[in-house]
Image (cartoon, rainbow, N blue to C red):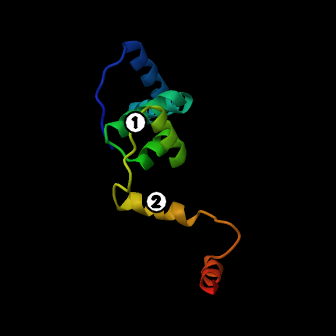
Amino acid sequence: MPRITGSYPDDLDLLIEGAVEAGVFGGKSDALREFVREYFEDHENERIAAAVALYERERITLGDAARLADVDRWTMRDILREHGVALRLGPADEEDAAYEVEAASELEFGGEDSDDEESRANDR
């Protein structure tokens, strides 16, 4: 897990310490993780902006961007296009390819089996 070093006002530090001492959080790190998590849960636009920026800088894949933005891949593609970000096509790695295969296998097409379509094509 990445570590972040930073500074914040003394009053905020005291509040965090008090919350830890009151048993609200297990430690300062737990408190800060919760604050950041809640911020992004409550601020959808900022979460999407972060995902777009990371994708644009080729730091994450489309699947990662969708997960961070809390949308599906198709919606993320639309969001990226709206922001003028060029899509990188094709899977980035084996995990991305496996996700694509799984997603494709869940698609449903019409009511007919492909075997029936093949046999009709052969009858022609």
The correct choice, above or below, for 110 with respect to 121 in the image is: above
Tag 1: amino acid: Val
Figure quadrant of residue 57: top left
Q: Which label was assigned to residue 53?
A: none
Q: Amino acid at mark 2?
A: Tyr
Q: Are marks 2 and 1 in contact (CB under 8 Å)?
A: no
Q: Which residue is mark 2?
A: 99
Residue nearer the viewer, 70 or 97: 97
Neighbor class of circle 2 (other Cα within 10 Å; few <14, some 14-19, many 20+) is few
Asked if residue 51 is positioned above or below residue 14 in the image, the reply reads below
Answer left or right for 84 relative to 102: left
Q: Which secondary structure, mark 2?
A: helix
The dot on residue 85 is 1
Query: Residue at the location (54% across, 43% down)?
Result: 75
Q: Is residue 22 visible?
A: no
- In depth, the one of 73 and 84 nearer the eye is 84
Residue placed at 51% from the left, 28% from the top? 45
Quadrant of residue 122 within the rendered picture: bottom right
| 2 vs 1, front mark | 1
